[in-house]
């Protein structure tokens, strides 16, 4: 029994010592921890400013375009159900001109499409429908404005990173050939590491921009679906309005 207690005491003592040692190691790592901004700056310098600058430019320009598109699309979002109710009420109380005034006072592509359809409603339902379809294509083009540039930066960033890596490897092997076989392995490893930093940076930039790109595309698809559904509902309203005028 004494041996068992002695063994348990020894185990507890060992675990306590190990815990203290681990705590000391964690404290030492925390003291040596480098701030993330400082680490990014260090990697940027190690990667070489001549190529890392181009990768950084892709990130800045791509993010600027993506943020601009997100703001534009959020401002373009309209409560189509509420707008349809207001247009229907305006048609019943004040006619087409009142409905056009509602559309003028409402922001977004759906209201603009409604206005074009109401503008041509006097020429018949067919002309109103053609106007809605034609102006819907125009609004879709405005929603997708700048997407091709974001796609360009997504493709360009990793390509620039790969080019920096290839050139860095060429320089490393040039150094090997000039040293006549007497190469310090640490110098060789450092050169390869610097070359690979550009590839990693390019891939990170492409991943970030791709996330924004997919969000923007999904937002545009949602708006386009709203525009199509609302356009069909507007034509139905105009048909009912014309029928009510004939009955009156």
Image (tube, helix red, strand yellow):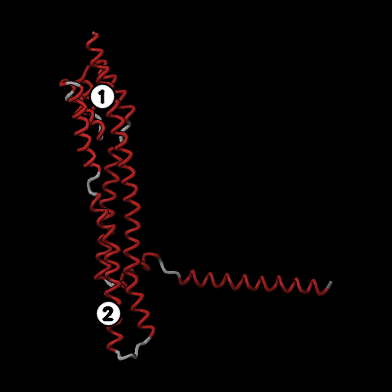
Instruction: State which quarter of the image contains the N terminus.
Output: bottom right
From this view, report whether residue 181 is shown above or below residue 119: below
> What residue is pinned by disc 1?
235
Spot occupied by residue 113 in the image (x, y as percentages of width and height)? 22, 31
- Circles 2 and 1 in contact, beta carbons < 8 Å: no
Label placed on residue 192: none
Spot occupied by residue 55 in the image (x, y as percentages of width and height)? 27, 64
Q: Residue furthest right?
A: 1
How packed mark 2 is, by other alpha carbons closer than 10 Å (few <14, some 14-19, many 20 or more), is some
Asked where in the image residue 47 lies, by quadrant, the reply is: bottom left
From this view, report whether residue 100 is shown above or below residue 6: above
Q: Residue furthest left?
A: 123
Closest to the observer: 49 or 26?
49
Asked where in the image residue 138 lies, by quadrant, the reply is: top left
Mark 2 secondary-structure assignment:
helix
Mark 2 or 1, which is nearer the eye? 1
Closest to the observer: 173 or 115?
173
How packed mark 1 is, by other alpha carbons closer than 10 Å (few <14, some 14-19, many 20 or more), is many
Closest to the observer: 216 or 4?
216
Closest to the observer: 36 or 99?
99
Asked where in the image residue 226 lies, by quadrant, the reply is: top left
Spot occupied by residue 34 in the image (x, y as percentages of width and height)? 42, 69
Per the model, the C-alpha gap separating discs 2 and 1 is 67 Å
Q: Residue at x 28, y 67 (%)?
A: 52
Which numbered disc, 2 or 1, marks the residue that appears first in the sequence? 2
Spot occupied by residue 61 in the image (x, y as percentages of width and height)? 25, 56
Mark 1 secondary-structure assignment:
helix
Instruction: State which quarter of the image contains the C terminus.
Output: top left
Q: Residue at x 27, y 78 (%)?
A: 170
> What residue is pinned by disc 2?
171
């Amino acid at each position: 029994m004494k041996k068992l207690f002695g063994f348990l005491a020894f185990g507890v003592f060992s675990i306590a010592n190990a815990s203290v040692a681990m705590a000391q190691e964690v404290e030492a790592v925390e003291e040596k921890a480098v701030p993330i901004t400082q680490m990014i700056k260090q990697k940027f310098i190690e990667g070489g400013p001549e190529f890392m600058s181009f990768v950084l430019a892709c990130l800045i320009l791509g993010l600027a375009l993506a943020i601009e598109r997100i703001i534009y699309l959020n401002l373009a979002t309209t409560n189509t159900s509420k707008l349809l109710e207001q247009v229907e009420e305006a048609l019943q109380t004040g006619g087409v001109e009142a409905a056009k005034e509602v559309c003028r006072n409402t922001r977004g592509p759906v209201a603009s499409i409604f206005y074009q359809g109401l503008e041509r409603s006097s020429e018949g339902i067919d002309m109103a429908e053609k106007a809605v379809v034609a102006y819907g294509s125009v609004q879709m083009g405005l929603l997708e404005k700048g997407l091709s540039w974001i796609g360009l930066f997504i493709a360009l960033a990793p390509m620039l990173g790969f080019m920096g890596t290839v050139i860095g490897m060429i320089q490393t092997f040039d150094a090997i050939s000039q040293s006549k076989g007497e190469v310090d392995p640490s110098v060789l490893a450092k050169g390869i590491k610097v070359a690979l930093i550009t590839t990693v940076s390019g891939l990170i930039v492409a991943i970030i921009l791709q996330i924004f790109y997919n969000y923007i595309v999904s937002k545009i698809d949602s708006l386009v679906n709203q525009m199509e559904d609302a356009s069909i509902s507007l034509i139905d309203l105009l048909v009912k309005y014309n029928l009510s005028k004939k009955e009156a």
